[in-house]
Image: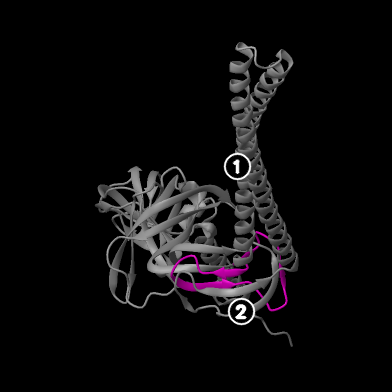
Amino acid sequence: MDRIIEKKPWYLQKKNWYLAVGVVAIVILYTAFLGTSGLSFRVDEETLSIADVKNDYFQEYIARTGTVNPITTVYLDAIEGGRVEEILLEEGSMVTKGDVILRLSNSELNLQILNSEAAFTEQVNRLRDTRLSMEQDRLNIKRNLLDIDLNLAKSKRQYTRNKTFFEKDLIAQEEFEASRDDYFYHKKVRDLLLERQKTDSLSRTIQIERLEANLSKMEDNLDLVREKLQNLNVKAPVSGQLGALNAELGESKSKGQRLGQVNVLDNYKINAMVDELYIARLNKGLNANFKFNGKEYLLKVSKVYPEVRNGQFEIDLKFDGNLPEGIRTGQTFRTKIELGEPREALLVPRGGFFQSTGGQWIFVVDPSGEFAVKREIKLGNQNPKYYEVLEGLQPGEKVITNSYELYGEAEKLLLK
């Protein structure tokens, strides 16, 4: 016998319930991911970084990590090449100017000194022999003068006597003329000896001066070679702490090669690398500071190196006042370098939004707190904490500063 099946109401049918649940789920998902329109995006407010736009004093600065170095570093170079024979001081030792750090040996330099000393001795002997020879010549001329003076005196007396006798016709003319010729001969010989004496004296003076000049040059050269030998003792050029020492026993070092350095520890500087973006704005004399053990220490930019390497350039910061107690070479500090004087400006905190927008727009939270809308802005200078706002925002407004990568092309954020 057939039984009549009663038709259930639509709200009691399971398939209708399944259909309704599916529609509701689709609406929820659509609302969650697409919002009320294709340009909206619903976000959880707890995941956002919301900051206030405010008027405050803006100090443009950059923060860089710097390394402590001695204010002065004097390098040790090998003035003369040689083999490392002895290392007297180790790295880190305190040295006084003139202390011998290491000794080198150079056989060629020793041979050069021996040759120079031999040549110098030979020149000294030559000068001595020349002086002796000249003295002998002088004495010979002097003795010849004595002889000629004696002969001249005798011939003069004989000539005078014969002249008188000849005038009285007591002697023959030939005898008179012979005595006269003998007298004038001895007189001319004496004149020649005097002339030779004068010439030889001048010649001897010039020759001795030349020999003495050559000897002086050879002596200077010998002193120079001896000084080179002394340069094989590598000495501390200044007082301080011996830094890196690049030398091993038995190692050969060429002339001019870097051996090490001496750090002058009466003061320090901080060396830092800065992005080339700031090369036109960083100048000598700018203020800087850092904190250490709860105290702030002042610095000044003392040198800006013009060379840019790998997108960065180097600066030196000199302490302007007291030094931190116990500071050591190689320590690092986070320095704050000021790029100008503080001024009043409209500020917004730094955040990940800048990477997404390039600083051209930002999401501004509505006063109701229910949503945020996209707004074009214009930013100026910046420091590690804030951007300077030039256009587009007002004091007291709230903005979202976290990254916008998940929001796509949304023009509006719905806050939940």
- Please identify the quarter of the rendering in which residue 117 is found: bottom right
Q: Secondary structure at mark 1?
A: helix
Q: Secondary structure at mark 2?
A: strand
- Location of residue 246 in the rendering, given as x and y in whole percent from the top left corner: 63, 72
Between tags 1 and 2, which lies in front?
A: 1
Nearest the eye: 210 or 273: 210
- Dot placed on the residue nearer the N-terminal end, 1 or 2: 2
Q: Is residue 85 above or below residue 253?
A: below
Amino acid type indicated by mark 1: Glu
Q: Residue furthest bottom?
A: 1
Mark 2 residue crowding within 10 angstroms, few (<14) / some (14–19) / many (20+) = some
Q: Is residue 416 visible?
A: no
- Label 1 sits on residue: 209
Q: Which residue is at a point 60% across and 42% down the rendered structure image?
A: 209
Instruction: Give the magenta-colored segment's residue range.
Output: 232-259
Q: Which residue is at a point 43% across and 57% down the rendered structure image?
A: 316
State the CA–CA distance, disc 1 to disc 2: 47 Å
- Location of residue 28 in the rendering, given as x and y in whole percent from the top left corner: 51, 66
- Location of residue 227 in the rendering, given as x and y in whole percent from the top left corner: 59, 61
Nearest the eye: 117 or 370: 117
Nearest the eye: 266 or 355: 266
Viewed as shown, does residue 374 lie left or right of 348?
right
Mark 1 residue crowding within 10 angstroms, few (<14) / some (14–19) / many (20+) = few
Q: Which residue is at a point 60% across and 50% down the rendered structure image?
A: 216
Nearest the eye: 379 or 156: 156
- Label 2 sits on residue: 87
